[in-house]
Image: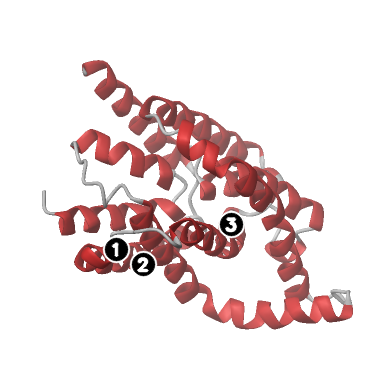
Amino acid sequence: MDIAVQALVMGIVQGLTEFLPISSSGHLIILPSLLGWSDPFIDSLAFSVVLHIGTLAALLSYFWRDWLVLVPAGLATIRDRSTHGDRHRRLALNIAISTVPAVIAGVLLNDWIEANVRQPGLVALMLVVGAATLWLADRWGSKLLRIDGLGALHALLIGAAQAFALIPGISRSGVSISAGLFVGLERADAARFSFLMATPIIAGAGLFELRKLAGGPSGAGDHLVPIVVGLLAAMIAGFAAIHVLLRYLRTNTMAVFVAYRIGLAALVLVSLLAR
């Protein structure tokens, strides 16, 4: 298959699955395996950076109004060493707190997990684990708390849960939304906080990968078309996924995502057994 078509498919899959609670890393491991794709650039670190930039662009283009308020509020919190009861300052502080566990886990474990925990069978297992977690959170969470009422301990717990997303198949959005539901957030507010806290995490992951690319050949200069196609596909699909999920969760449960994760895990296991 033409590499530009592969880039288009991978970009769409990355954009959708980064924000829907169904695991982007899991899909990006499973899809080439199921379709028999083996192009080295599509599986390269350089293309991974491209997809990260696309999903970061989706977040910034959707939440730019929020960040125009949150960034000054965060700086004011640092300056005054106080939130002064300001909801924007408190939200900015909570986002900062929530990133700490993921940053620590990413720095310590990311390279090891990338090298050792990318088997389709394990991804299938984690899809089921994530489905069970999402189902329990949706069932047991009170869904009475709004994002403005989120406390620092809540933010830390959600951030700690997000660190488990390093394991392919768990899903960053899935585990952080689940944690938000467990601490009592409404479904849409759990998703909104998950997306806001994802912005510095995805930006940091992209910079971390760029650091690994520095000083070595990336092959990017020879693949301009798939780079542009993948980036735009990830950005547009990501923007659409954010918009649709926030609207969907105002009136619906997580059941469809639980069912999808279990169905995909079954498909992967059947495929592995057939081989």
Report crowding for label 3: few under 14, some 14 to 19, many 20 or more residues within 10 A (C-alpha): many
Name the residue type under label 1.
Ala
Query: Could you say where residue 156 lies in the image, as x and y percent from the top left?
Result: 75, 51
What is the C-alpha distance between the residues marked 2 and 3? 17 Å
What is the C-alpha distance between the residues marked 1 and 2? 19 Å
Front one among 232 and 139: 232
Residue sitting at x 71%, y 70%: 92
Q: Earlier in the sequence, mark 1 or mark 2?
A: 1
Please name the residue that numbered disc 2 is placed on: 235
Please name the residue that numbered disc 3 is placed on: 194
Residue 179 tag number: none
Question: Is there CB contact under 8 Å for labels 1 and 2?
Answer: no
Q: Which of marks 2 and 3 is nearer the N terminus?
A: 3
- Horizontal side of 63 relative to 89 (left or right) equals left
Name the residue type under label 3.
Ser
Q: Which of marks 1 and 3 is nearer the N terminus?
A: 3
Front one among 194 and 249: 194
The residue at the far left in this view is 1
Query: Could you say where residue 231 lies in the image, as x and y percent from the top left?
Result: 32, 66
Report crowding for label 2: few under 14, some 14 to 19, many 20 or more residues within 10 A (C-alpha): many
Residue sitting at x 55%, y 61%: 195
Please name the residue that numbered disc 1 is placed on: 220
Residue 259, image quadrant: top left
Establish if 221 lies above or below 71: above
Q: Is mark 1 on a helix, strand or loop?
A: helix
Numbered-mark total: 3
Query: Could you say where residue 209 lies in the image, as x and y percent from the top left?
Result: 48, 57
